[in-house]
Image (cartoon, rainbow, N blue to C red):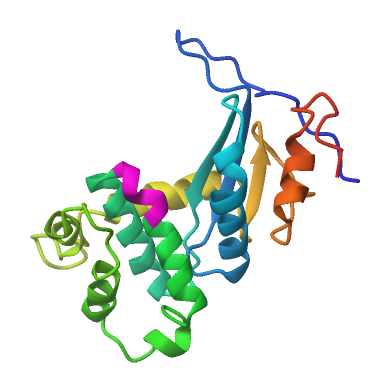
Amino acid sequence: MGPPLPPESCGTTLTKTAPNKIQIECFLDLICPFSAKMFNTLYDKVIPSLDEDITVTIHQVIQPWHPQGTMVHEAALAVREVSPEHYAPYVSAVYAAFSGGKFKDDDSWNKTRAQIYEELLEMVPEGVDKDAVKALLIMADGGGNAGNEMTKHIKFACKFHRTRGVHVTPTVFVNGVEAGVVSSGWSEEDWKKFLAAKGKDFFRNV
């Protein structure tokens, strides 16, 4: 049994629209097998039946020891920029490809950055403007270390998870507090048991 977790957000919302009572934040690396397992369980099995007062938010965590991961994360953020409703399906497709061997070190070691982008663009869902996504990934004008249009988004993602003290993936926060009890190995039943009391048990029903 882990330490008690807050039954609702620790903060106070001053705007008219209050956030959902229970906020689950999942910090995931898009080329991490444990993150993949957590995402697939949540996206395919848990989220479709969640009550409306529970929010699940994904935060991307780029791990520098897998340099190809930067391109993968850029592509996902680019899809979100162009068509937010296709973000989750694209991440799901990326994890499926990763589980099949794509974007791992041995798959990408001798590929150029441009080649990895092309592979990622091939996975853009139907209904998304692929050219618009590609435009966000090409080198920005200015030369040097100008990066691309997604560089600033990658910087924000890194700054955010570093500010929150996240290092390993996946890491889960419940209402702003790290929930070390949550495991990537959790099944649909584990998640539903954890969330069933909606914090009245301080999320200790695990």
How many numbered discs?
0
Residue 72, compared with residue 41, is above or below; it is: below
Residue extending farthest to the left is 141
Residue shown at 39%/75% (left/top)? 68
Magenta residue span: 84-89
Residue shown at 77%/27% (left/top)? 199
Residue 63, compared with residue 98, is above or below; it is: above
Q: Nearer the viewer, residue 144 or 87?
A: 87
Q: Which of 144 and 1 is in front in this view?
A: 1
Left or right for 204, reference 180: right
Residue shown at 47%/74% (left/top)? 98
Left or right for 179, reference 156: right
Quarter of the image with the C terminus in it: top right
Left or right for 136, reference 110: left
Residue 159, compared with residue 98, is above or below; it is: above
Q: Which of 125 and 106 is in front in this view?
A: 125
Left or right for 138, reference 54: left
Residue 61 in the magenta stretch? The answer is: no
Secondary structure that dominates the magenta span: helix
* Residue 194 image point, x, y percent: 78, 40
Which quadrant holds residue 84? top left
Q: From where the camera sits, is residue 179 visible? A: yes
Residue extending farthest to the right is 1
* Residue 108 image point, x, y percent: 38, 85
Q: Which of 162 and 21 is in front in this view?
A: 21
Q: From where the camera sits, is residue 66 visible? A: no
Residue 189, compared with residue 13, is above or below; it is: below
* Residue 33 image point, x, y percent: 59, 70
* Residue 93 image point, x, y percent: 41, 64
Residue shown at 42%/80% (left/top)? 102
